[in-house]
Amino acid sequence: MSEAIRDVVILGGGSAGWLVAGILAADHGRSLRITLVESPDVATVGVGEGTWPTMRDTLRRIGVSESAFIRECDASFKQGSKFIGWRDGGAHDHYHHPFVLPQGYLDADLVGGWLQHPGVPFGELVSFQPHLCEAGRAPKQFATPEFAAVANYAYHLDAGKLGGFLRRHCVDMLGVRHVSDHVTAIESGDNGDISGLRTRDHDIVAGDLFIDCTGMRALLLGEHYGIAHASQGHVLFTDRAIAVQVPHADPEGPLACQTLSTAQRCGWTWDIGLPSRRGLGYVYSSAHTSDDEAADVLRRHVVATGGAEPDGAAMRRIGIRPGYRERSWHRNCVAIGLSSGFVEPLEASSLVLVELAATMLSEQMPATRATMDTVASRFNDSFTYRWERVVDFLKLHYVLSAREDSDFWRDHRRPETIPDRLRAMLELWRHQPPSRYDLPRVDEIFPSASYQYVLYGMGFRPEARTGGGPSRRVDAAAKANGYFREAAELSRRMIAALPSHREMIAHATRHGMPRL
């Protein structure tokens, strides 16, 4: 059991498989042999079009050119999300979850200051970024180097093109061995570890560590090892999605710089703007509506937002099993991506979990089989925690809604559907805003600022303390107001100085961006 880890085999391609291959090959290319086995008979899901700002660091880490990435993956910039109709469905119901921290976030009681400005949306008072998005501005200038930012950003992208782009980079530049073949059997050693993958045309692909990137099927961790799936369907009800791609009404018109998430009667729709098209979808609960009704909702939403009515044949239906594996690492097998779990696409947590898993695996790569179980235990603890926090954060969007147009929203507010930890935090947040003390880990997926954007965007108002305000700080209002003025001034200056989103994408595509 002390054998050195030399051969790592990844089963499954797509965004997850190739991101894992790229990170491992970039970090361990001289000490590990990385092989990716990808079946030509299995299609990838290919609809994860939103990312988090971590993707910039990931692409830079593996040596990718940002200009080439934007050009080849039909990518655009994402500065956050705009939620429409989530609070009560009224005519002016919207709020923003931007990627930048509120101005003065760790230095002032911004929530106490915001309460002195009734009627002003929290995100638009404390941050300049919602104003950039509403004005259609890019998060950087023509002269800003690759991966650098004026305003923090991630990407929208074509997931199918991303897989191909990463495959070419990993094979041509990082030396990853690509085996295009269908796996027919899993070979096991005497100790119960996986020893190899029997393929149709390449005999057995042997390895010391196997990474399961086979999507929701979880061929290795789920089917071979039988690691159970911990369903979260009792907390988050969306178990279906229907997606479609439509052209822009005006190919040269404004390009959205944020994901648009619009609440519907039995779920919500996403709208993502890529340079060449829009990607839209409806995420819904089959217990609250039918597939035909869902398709009709998506059609009407596309038309209402300026698109031509899509052909039903162009709509792609996707099943969702909200939940995650009880363990992501068992023996010498690690599941990353959909094989590890998926709850729903709200807030684009899927790819960032892939990045975090691949990064932790790479940085904690066991040198020998004898040390693997210790690393696996840490990995499992970390990702159980992360999955629980993703579930809490997504549930927060639903449990605060006052919508009454269907049982879907009412059911989400039932106390028995709210995780105990989230219920306790909501009680605490009645008296103090979310802070770093509520989220103790260094690499939280959603920092406390994200909880504040959603909490107060959804209309939650903390109870005032004795003395007329929510803050113990005597200078709270004055200090916060100074940062509010600073955010407003930054908004004014940046809107004047930054190019439009479409202009920046066109420049990056045609001329590239400076490389550091």
Image: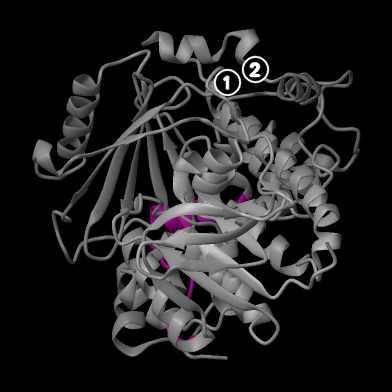
Q: Is residue 176 above or below residue 305?
A: below
Q: Residues within 10 Å of mark 1 (few under 14, many from 20)?
A: many
Magenta residues (range): 127-143
Q: Is residue 194 above or below residue 121?
A: below
Q: Nearer the viewer, residue 414 or 47?
A: 47
Q: CA distance from mark 2 to mark 1?
A: 6 Å
Q: Check the image and tell me how it is coloured.
A: one colour
Q: Which mark is residue 334?
A: none
Quadrant in the picture for residue 489: bottom right
Q: Nearer the viewer, residue 132 or 469?
A: 132
On screen, residue 412 versus residue 161, left or right, reads right
Q: Which mark is residue 235?
A: 1
Q: Nearer the viewer, residue 423 or 20?
A: 20
Residue where numbered disc 2 is placed: 418
Q: Residues within 10 Å of mark 2 (few under 14, many from 20)?
A: many
Residue 182 included in the magenta stretch of the image = no
Residue 128 included in the magenta stretch of the image = yes
Looking at the rendered image, the disc whose residue lies closer to the viewer, 2 or 1, is 1
Circles 2 and 1, Cβ within 8 Å, touching? The answer is yes
Q: Is residue 150 visible?
A: no
Q: Residue at x 27, y 65 (%)?
A: 275
